[in-house]
């Protein structure tokens, strides 16, 4: 029987505010079995970029990453935010290790091709080295993964944290019984966006097709659920979409086959 592993992805706001970060790390420490934490940090990047006189450009919620912004996100995601989390986890008794995709060649990506929009130095994931991550995890380490990858040619690439979490979960699914958890500001996938209590408790792929066709699920939730089903097809046991205050797995929307 495979040992349990939980991959938790948390957005920037949760990890960037001291009180919410402290609570998150306390709750994360209570999760049984092996663990991986994947984080964002976009608000901090935007704030520090502004202080440096660098303008942030966003298209459909995604950051345009020119050379100057790449320097900022590398510093903020791989340094400031990542190391705060690592230090916080050490205080919770977990031997955390902060990683970008470049460290130990954990995640290799390619620069996103220019189509309608040039996103700049943004990476689309090619490969996650699940074997080396598995060795770290088996040694009792808790990987803390920043949303940065590399192209193998010396270039860092800004990479979507949801994608990193999903691809990492897939890469570890042959070694562990993996639960992937996407945390955001709502309690789960809602049947009514105006009603925070209208959480859909379970969604199958058939449900997803129906909900997208009738408009119940729309916008940014569609790619999140597409990521979830992609993970399920690759061997991840379960995906949960929930709030960061509910990472015990008892609340939210469960995605299964």
Image (cartoon, rainbow, N blue to C red):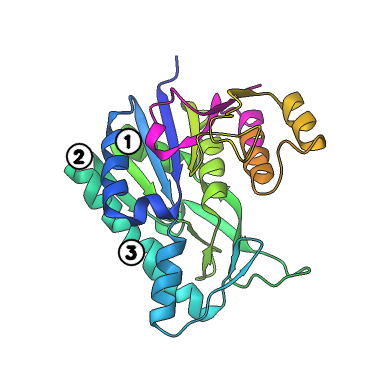
Q: Earlier in the sequence, mark 3 or mark 2?
A: 3
- Kindly indicate the quadrant of the structure image that contains residue 4: top left
Q: CA distance from mark 3 to mark 1?
A: 21 Å
Check residue 92 in the rendering and tell me which mark sits there, or answer none: 2
Which residue sits furthest top? 1
Query: Mark 3 or 1, which is nearer the eye?
Result: 1
Gap in angstroms between the C-alphas marked 2 and 1: 9 Å
Q: For the residue labelled by badge 2, is the local secondary structure a helix, a strand or a loop?
A: loop
Q: Which residue is mark 3?
A: 79
Instruction: Specify the label residue 177 is tagged with.
Output: none
Rendered view: 120 above or below 228: below
Look at the numbered discs 3 and 2 and tell me whether their residues touch, using CB distance below 8 Å. Answer: no
| Towards the viewer: 99 or 70 | 70
* Vertical arrangement, residue 50 with respect to residue 89, above or below: below
Camera-side residue of 4 and 207: 207
Query: Residue 255 lies in magenta, yes or no?
Result: yes
Residue at image point 60% right, 34% down:
189
| Residue 168 in view in this figure | yes
Asked whether, in this view, residue 240 is left or right of residue 136, the answer is right
Which residue position holds label 1? 28
Query: In the figure, is residue 64 to the left or right of 243?
Result: right
Residue drawn at point x = 20 percent, y = 39 percent: 92
Boundaries of the magenta span? 230-257
- Label 3 or label 1, whichever comes before in sequence order: 1
Say which residue appears at 33% left-offset and 24% top-offset: 32
Give the farthest residue toward the bottom: 53
Is 197 one of the magenta-colored residues? Answer: no
**Residue 202 in the image, given as x and y percentages of width and height:** 61, 22
Sequence-wise first label, 2 or 1: 1
Could you tell me which quadrant the N terminus lies in? top left
- Given residues 246 and 159, the one toward you in this image is 246
């Amino acid at each position: 029987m495979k040992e349990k592993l939980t991959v938790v992805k948390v957005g920037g706001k949760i990890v960037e505010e001291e009180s919410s970060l402290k609570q998150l790390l306390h709750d994360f420490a209570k999760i049984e079995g092996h663990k991986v934490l994947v984080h964002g940090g976009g608000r901090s990047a935007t704030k520090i970029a502004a202080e440096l006189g660098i303008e942030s450009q966003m298209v459909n919620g995604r950051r345009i990453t020119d050379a100057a912004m790449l320097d900022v996100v590398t510093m903020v995601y791989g340094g400031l935010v990542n190391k705060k989390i690592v230090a916080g986890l050490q205080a919770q008794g977990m031997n955390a290790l902060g990683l970008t995709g470049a460290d130990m060649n954990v995640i290799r990506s390619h620069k996103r091709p220019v189509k309608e929009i040039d996103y700049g130095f943004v990476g689309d994931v090619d490969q996650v080295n699940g074997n080396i991550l598995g060795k770290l995890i088996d040694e009792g380490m808790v990987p803390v993964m920043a949303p940065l990858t590399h192209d193998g040619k010396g270039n860092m690439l800004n990479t979507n944290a949801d994608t990193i979490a999903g691809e990492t979960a897939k890469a570890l699914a042959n070694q562990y019984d993996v639960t992937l958890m996407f945390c955001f500001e709502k309690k789960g996938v809602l049947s009514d966006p105006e009603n925070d209590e209208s959480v859909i408790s379970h969604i199958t792929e058939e449900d997803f097709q129906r909900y997208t066709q009738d408009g119940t699920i729309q916008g940014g939730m569609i790619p999140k659920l597409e990521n979830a089903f992609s993970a399920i097809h690759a061997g991840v046991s379960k995906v949960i979409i929930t709030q960061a205050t509910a990472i015990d797995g008892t609340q939210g929307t469960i995605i299964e086959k």
